């Protein structure tokens, strides 16, 4: 689970909502339905400018792990930003940006963007899209050899999963290494954030065994390989972790507790013991209970 993040600079302090959990729905995934969303941006308390007429600058913070819905919400709440894309569907927005047919999820680079009155939301998105493409290309060209990733798009998808799995910089490459190992072995990724993304509005904050067993295009417990699109905006560190993963024998990991760290295991037996220790507090999992959903399905390939 990703913790809330604090974005700051010299002119504003912007507290943004946790990028996880986020409600998603198939309206977004299928480019059908108008977008609404949430984000946060504050007008600078100390404007950059003065009575002499110099231009006042504003900033918009796009946060790692955000969904496209949240990006749109932040654009709509940004002060003095002209809404050139208001009420457009996701497919229409991407067409306006020169990429018709491209799913918008994960395609925009999380960063702080500065603008002045008169700038448009389309200009911000165009800059974020270009920066993501540039970052992805640069990391792809220096990638490790023999990765089980066929394209930059696949790298972006996996990076989005890593981004949602952890907010700890010291663990990104390890988690990426686990997923790379599983892809090499033909094991299902079994990533909870992909299940949540596929659940859409059905997600109520808890994942149950039935959720892990309910098939969607994004459920990596029921489907092999990568999801069809990214599930969030990955930052550069997550992209770099996927393309330069840690060398590890681990195939599993489980959250230790409130500090956001994970315990990594090379065998299923070690992993189940870690689940019992850190999530079930020493109690054996009960088949069919909500707790069993934390272990995974099917049992022989479980990861969480």
Image (cartoon, rainbow, N blue to C red):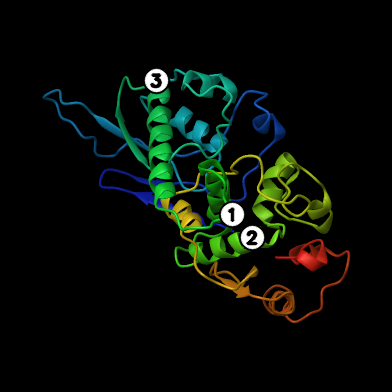
- Vertical arrangement, residue 272 with respect to residue 17, above or below: below
- Vertical arrangement, residue 256 with respect to residue 2, above or below: below
Label 1: element kind: loop
Q: Which residue is mark 2?
A: 184
Question: Alpha-carbon neighbours of circle 3 within 10 Å: few (<14), some, or many (≥20)?
Answer: some
Identity of the residue furthest to the right in this view? 288
User: Is residue 125 rendered to the left or right of residue 219?
Assistant: left
State whether residue 61 appears in this view. Answer: no
Quadrant housing residue 255: bottom right
- What is the x, y in percent for residue 82? 39, 20
Quadrant housing residue 37: top right
Circles 1 and 2, Cβ within 8 Å, touching? The answer is yes
> Quick one: 31 or 112, which is closer to the camera?
31
Label 3: element kind: loop
Q: Which residue is mark 3?
A: 82
Picture quarter with the N terminus: bottom right
Give the mark nearer the N terminus: 3 vs 2: 3
Question: Could you tell me which residue is drawn at 59 percent across and 23 percent down?
Answer: 91
Q: Which residue is mark 1?
A: 148
Picture quarter with the C terminus: bottom right
Question: Could you tell me which residue is drawn at 53 percent across and 53 percent down?
Answer: 163
State whether residue 266 appears in this view. Answer: yes
> Quick one: 195 or 298, which is closer to the camera?
298
User: Is residue 290 rendered to the left or right of residue 245?
Assistant: right
> Quick one: 42 or 271, which is closer to the camera?
271
Q: What's the distance in space between the residues labelled 1 and 3, CA to CA?
A: 43 Å
């Amino acid at each position: 689970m990703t913790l809330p993040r604090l974005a700051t600079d010299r002119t504003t302090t912007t507290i943004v909502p946790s990028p996880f959990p986020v409600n998603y729905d198939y309206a977004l995934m299928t480019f059908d339905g108008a977008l609404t969303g949430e984000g946060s941006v504050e007008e600078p308390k100390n404007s950059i400018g003065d009575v002499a007429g110099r231009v006042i600058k504003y900033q918009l913070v796009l946060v790692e792990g955000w969904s496209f819905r949240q990006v749109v919400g932040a654009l709509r709440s940004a002060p003095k930003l002209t809404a050139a894309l208001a009420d457009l569907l996701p497919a229409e927005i991407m067409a306006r940006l020169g990429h018709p047919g491209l799913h918008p999820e994960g395609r925009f680079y999380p960063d702080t963007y500065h603008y002045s009155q008169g700038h448009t939301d389309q200009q911000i998105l165009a800059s974020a899209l270009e920066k993501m493409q540039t970052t992805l290309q640069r990391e792809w060209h220096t990638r490790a050899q023999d990765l089980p990733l066929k394209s930059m798009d696949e790298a972006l998808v996996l990076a989005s999963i890593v981004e949602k799995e952890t907010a700890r910089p010291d663990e990104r490459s390890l988690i990426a290494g686990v997923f790379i190992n599983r892809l090499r072995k033909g094991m299902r990724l079994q990533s909870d954030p992909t299940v949540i993304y596929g659940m859409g509005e059905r997600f109520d904050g808890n994942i149950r065994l039935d959720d892990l067993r309910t098939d969607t295009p994004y459920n990596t417990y029921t489907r092999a390989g990568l999801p069809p699109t990214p599930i969030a905006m990955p930052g550069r560190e997550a992209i770099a972790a996927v393309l330069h993963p840690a060398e590890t024998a681990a195939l599993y990991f489980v959250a230790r507790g409130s500090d956001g760290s994970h315990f990594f295991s090379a065998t299923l037996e070690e992993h189940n013991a870690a689940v019992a220790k850190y999530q079930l507090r020493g109690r054996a999992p009960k088949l069919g209970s909500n707790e069993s959903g934390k272990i995974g399905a099917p049992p022989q390939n479980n990861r969480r």
